[in-house]
Image (tube, rainbow, N blue to C red):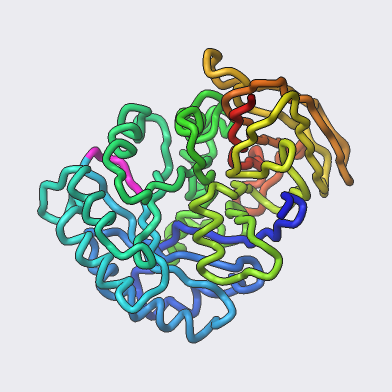
Amino acid sequence: MSSSALHWLRGDLHTHCEDPALAAAYLEGVGGRLDFVALTNHAQKPALGEQAEVITRMRTLLPGLLFFSGLEWNTPTGGHACLIFPPSLREHEHAQAFAQTYDRLAGSQPVVPEALAFLAALPLAERPLLFFNHPAPGQWSAPELDLYLAADQGAVIAGIEAVHGHQTRDLVLTLDPLRYPGSAPGGLADHLYTQGRPFALLANSDFHIHKQHLKPDYTPGVFNHIRAGVAPDQRDSAAVFAALRQGRTCAVQGHWLDLGDFRVGQARLGDTWTGPGQGLLALVLEAGETLESLDLIGQFSRTQAPAILHSFGPQPAGALDLSLPVPAGAHGFVRLRALAARRERPWPSQHASRLFLSSAILLEGR
């Protein structure tokens, strides 16, 4: 299956609903914007115990939407991470057992290897995916990520948030998305890619329906969202989890750009290009508006730090068909970053940047 054959499902894997009575309000408009969504209540709060009821109600109200049950983990090192469980009869049981034993704020004193060993011991079909949440300055570091990767014996760790949630908060609006630690050139995502394994780049809302009366925020699918690449005939939970595990995702702010094709040779997002000889990177986009910049980020040699490999510069709205030679023997990765020219977001935060980011194609040329 070529990259152009991918069908893009839209989703949000970091949301909260701490009041079962707000389940219907949470869903307003979501079915028209997203294909999958995860409820990730905090591991130390009573709401996690009520999550089974909320998920059941949501699945009944919107049977065409894929609902995943998860939790936001207060990790032993101080950062947050989301665990997303595949649908099963024991999805809530696993989340509760993990939270009671391995959450930093639940009265226990967890350690990373033991927590990840618990997850690795679950049956493969019931094993969750782990994503590092909102790596704003001071919340995650490369050594901490390495600690988790070294302890991950069950291939649970799958990706990282490329941009911040809570999209309308004043603090978030002061963050420069081009330098955000999750997705900046040479940042945490690139640190993961230099290790030669696929990772998913994510954009989630971190929406809290029960806090909307305090500070309005974009509801799921309005702004930050994930695009997961699946085969055109696959729209089930297994296909979404496979795309996330493979790193076949885009992290998107708004709805102004569509990715038609992005590959090196026959290797698409999450795949590894192996050559032989020189490769050709092909990029096909449909831009709904003018782009201020369109960049390729990565490395062609592991002796060089990840950086902007090539800039296509500003681009007009409409269909874009671009290409770039990839040198023979290239080792590293390449990913896409596009920036909209207009600085307009939906109300109530009208003026700020909007990014479109892809996960990486890995390079092992020969």
Would residue 258 be visible to someone looking at this image?
no
- Relative to 221, 286 lies left or right: right
Compared with 215, 284 (above or below) is above
The residue lying at 54 percent from left, 62 percent from top is 240
Residue at the extreme bottom: 60
Front residue (pair 132, 316): 132
Query: Percent position (x, y) of residue 145?
Result: 35, 34
Would residue 109 be visible to someone looking at this image?
yes
Query: Percent position (x, y) of residue 2?
Result: 73, 51
Front residue (pair 301, 135): 301
The residue lying at 37 percent from left, 75 percent from top is 88
In the picture, the quarter occupied by the N terminus is bottom right
In the picture, the quarter occupied by the C terminus is top right
How many dots with numbers?
Answer: 0
Q: Image quarter for residue 97?
A: bottom left
Query: Percent position (x, y) of residue 194?
Result: 49, 27
Residue at the extreme top: 303
- Relative to 94, 137 lies left or right: right
